[in-house]
Image (tube, grey):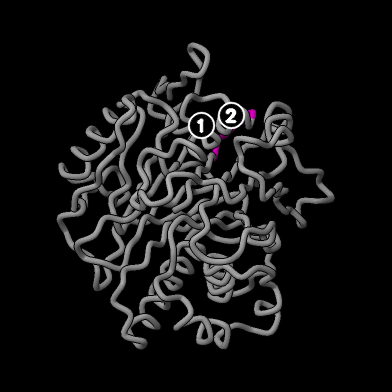
Amino acid sequence: MCRFLLYKGKQPILLAHLITRPKHSIVNQSFDSRLRIDLRRPLNGDGFGVGWYESETHPEEEDHVTPCIFTSVTPAWNNVNLVRLAEKIRSPLVFAHVRASTSGSVSETNCHPWSYGRIMWMHNGGIAQFDKIKRKLQNSLSENLFLFVQGNTDSEWAFALFLSFLSNPDANKFDYQELKQAMLKTVAQLNTWAEEEDITEPSLLNFAVTDGETVVCIRYTSSKTDEAASLYFSSGTRFECYKPGHYRMVKADRREDIVVVASEPLTFEKADWLTIPTNNILVVTPKLNVLLQPIKDKFYTPDRGMEVKIGEEDVIIPEPKAQLFKIQAEEQMQSDQPVTVCN
């Protein structure tokens, strides 16, 4: 089980404020992950990756926006170049990922995130018995998307499948609804193939994708009873350091100037983070509106969240059980005890 985080803000942020400086930064999570479902492998040391978009784009390059991605097979906690880059680079949209290999060899081609044109993708989890559906997935792709895949992970093939559901994956602009629907179609297609092959083992599909403007991510498992891999989000007007290693999300007013999504909270401030309920999709629009909705497929169960209307949008308020787990997990994160997930 990997760990990832993403940041989208109106203003660029220094990568170090997300990746290296917080007490529970993504680098710390590479060797001290507290909320993993799979406790057999406590380390996320099979490589890492960071992707970001430039703060300012020259007018001549607006139609050719692509992310910059830095990957390495060394553990994130032991890569001096990552620390150096994090102290110099600022970006309004950042993806970061530390890997614990469940599928595919340890190589840079298998490190998340990946990009295609202006689109960037990462995954935490695994597609159950992927070898049984891999050929079907490959056969569904166009020649261009089939040849695009360079590694041998289920995650990168899932990215190619996602791209196949876009009307034009080479486009310079995407509507957030198209990205959302492509994500839902990707999950639905994987479930269909799993059913055709009589695969009953649940898949863990925490996917995240962005085009540099919109962010779409899901917390998902193909099970009615199991919890998906952990995923949290925080939003506010300012993400600040109030003492070395300690950060908090400041909410000066009702505006959403910053949104952070992470496998594990970066801060120990309980009020900062909300659990994304299992089998929900979260969309951060270009204007930083946060939309959180359930995925109502055959694995949907209403007790995983309740749907309410805030303003003009349908959103999900996490159910008491999810919030109780969140509180228990946060308390354990501040101790040296491992977190136990009870279904």
Q: Is 220 left, or right, of 30 in this rendering?
A: left
Q: Nearer the viewer, residue 31 or 26?
A: 31
Residue linked to disc 1: 25
- Is residue 178 placed above or below 13 in the rendered structure? below
Identify the element where label 1 is drawn: loop
Image coords of residue 148 (percent x, y): 70, 73
Q: Nearer the viewer, residue 64 or 132?
A: 132
Q: Is 21 left, or right, of 271 in this rendering?
A: right
Q: Residue at x 57, y 58 (%)?
A: 121
- Residue range in magenta is 8-14
Q: Are marks 1 and 2 in contact (CB under 8 Å)?
A: yes
Residue kind at label 1, given as amino acid type: Ser
Residue at the far front: name it: 40
Residue linked to disc 2: 20
Which image quadrant is residue 269 in?
top left
Chief SS of the magenta region: strand
Real-space Cα separation, disc 1 to disc 2, in angstroms: 6 Å
Which image quadrant is residue 54 in?
top right
Mark closest to the chain's N terminus, 1 or 2: 2
Residue kind at label 2, given as amino acid type: Thr
Q: Nearer the viewer, residue 289 or 136?
A: 136
Image coords of residue 235 (percent x, y): 42, 33
- Is residue 154 placed above or below 235 in the rendered structure? below
Image coords of residue 338 (percent x, y): 31, 37
Number of other residues with Cα within 10 Å of mark 2, as a class: few under 14, some 14 to 19, many 20 or more: many
Give the label on residue 200, or none.
none
Q: Residue at x 61, y 70 (%)?
A: 152
Number of other residues with Cα within 10 Å of mark 1, as a class: few under 14, some 14 to 19, many 20 or more: many
